[in-house]
Amino acid sequence: MAEAAARPSQWTPLELGIRNVLGARKRRQVAQEIASAARAKYGELKRRKIRPPLDQLVQSILWRHTSVRRGTRALRELKRTFVDWNEVRVSPIVEIARAVSSADWSCSCAEHLRSALWGLFTASNVVSLELIHELPTSQARAFLQGLPGVPRDVADEVLLFSCGAPLLPVGDSAARMCHRLGLIESDPHLLRAGVEYDVDRSRLPEGEVLLDEVRMCFPGA
């Protein structure tokens, strides 16, 4: 009878190192193939606009309620309708919802936005997120997650897009997709534990691409 395969606990440090290197190479190859296929179908990547942190937080919340295009359009309409985000905070839900969209999701989105803005005002006595530029990444993330209705992937999105933090925002659906593609080896449900998932920027293309309603962003080095 053939010998049973060695369990991970029985591997030597050299064997573990070789497996990790091979795994990293495979994941890099898969990522490059995905990026190449996206370029071939959707064209070259383009640089994205860097928004202030609070604008990005509002944008990210909008994206959780609707598509990227509709959410971006709703952000522009909110900024056109209201003087600033503090006015949004003190405005009735119905007025915020009217500015966001005429669709059914606008009321729940308006409540979500106003709750986050009130939470920010309560925490810092000002409706601004400029303070996160001065904080270490872990503290900035903790502050953002302390706001009502701001999960980790939204917090990481704000830090990545507005502050250039080397983070990969991973929601449940994105984690499952990365797991199926072989970009991560762990069970995607384990990614929600309080573990850092930094991005090696040298392995990613620069810019962003829209895949129908799925948004894939690759920050520059």
Image (cartoon, rainbow, N blue to C red):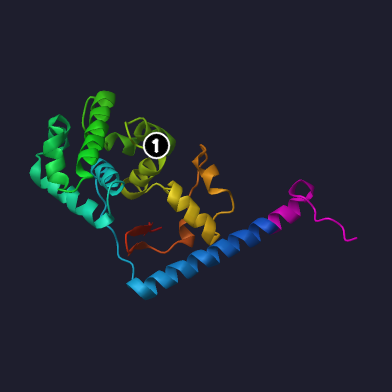
Look at the image and give the residue range highlighted in magenta. 1-18
Q: Residue 178, image x and y in percent? A: 50, 56
The image quadrant where one finds the N terminus is bottom right
Q: Residue 210, image x and y in percent? A: 32, 63
Q: Residue 17, image x and y in percent? A: 69, 55
Place residue 207 in its image quadrant.
bottom left
Check residue 157 for magenta coloring.
no
Q: Residue furthest bottom?
A: 40
Q: Residues within 10 Å of mark 1 (few under 14, many from 20)?
A: many
Q: Residue at x 24, y 57 (%)?
A: 69
Q: Residue furthest right?
A: 1
Relative to 211, say whether 14 is above or below. Answer: above
User: Does residue 43 appear left or right of residue 28 in this picture?
Assistant: left
Q: Residue at x 79, y 48 (%)?
A: 10
Residue that mark 1 sits on: 141
User: Does residue 176 appear left or right of residue 127 in this picture?
Assistant: right
63 or 154: which is nearer to us? 63
